[in-house]
Image: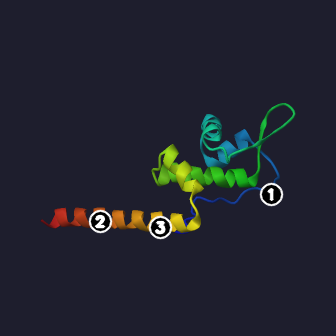
Amino acid sequence: MQNDTSYQKELPDKLYFKVGEVSAIVEVPAYVLRFWEAEFKKINPKRSPTGQRLYRKNDIDLILKIKHLLYDKKFTIQGARQYLKMTPAEKKETSSITTLNEIRKELKKIRDLIS
């Protein structure tokens, strides 16, 4: 994913965001956020005294990254979990392999078109 940060967004200057606000920013329903919270332990919003989730900017950045991996890069939940655990060097190697595989697929399509 060679420094692909296209999924990042400019966030309002606030300390905490409620689940509805995060849902609007990330453009996924609140139940998806709650599901991802269970699947990705790094998403760990604070709780208000009434039990409401309060997300920090770093939580939102992580959620946007997860959305990018799942929706744009077509990772599975398990694949996204593993990718997030990788070191930067491992991510670069994985990204290079993915790019080569994509190039091979495109070349095969072109070959099939001209033959």
Q: Position of residue 73 (x, y in %)?
A: 47, 54
Q: Earlier in the sequence, mark 2 or mark 1?
A: 1
Measure the alpha-carbon separation of dots 2 and 3.
17 Å
Quadrant in which residue 85 is drawn: bottom right
Which mark, by number, is residue 13? Answer: 1
Q: Position of residue 24 (x, y in %)?
A: 66, 45
- Observer-nearest of 12 and 15: 15
Q: Residue at x 33, y 67 (%)?
A: 103
Q: Quadrant of the C terminus?
A: bottom left
Task: Say what amino acid the circle numbered 3 marks.
Answer: Glu
- Observer-nearest of 53 and 100: 100
Q: Residue at x 61, y 36 (%)?
A: 35
Answer whether residue 1 is visible to the viewer in this image: no
Residue 93 is left or right of residue 26, and the answer is: left
Q: Which residue is mark 2?
A: 104
Task: Say what amino acid the circle numbered 2 marks.
Answer: Arg
Q: Position of residue 50 (x, y in %)?
A: 85, 31
Q: Are marks 3 and 1 in contact (CB under 8 Å)?
A: no
Q: Which residue is mark 3?
A: 93
Measure the alpha-carbon separation of dots 2 and 1.
44 Å
- Observer-nearest of 13 and 35: 35
Q: Earlier in the sequence, mark 3 or mark 1?
A: 1
Q: Earlier in the sequence, mark 2 or mark 3?
A: 3
Given this view, does label 3 or label 1 mark the residue nearer the observer?
3
Task: Say what amino acid the circle numbered 1 marks.
Answer: Asp
**Badge 1, how many Cα within 10 Å: few under 14, some, many 20+?**
few
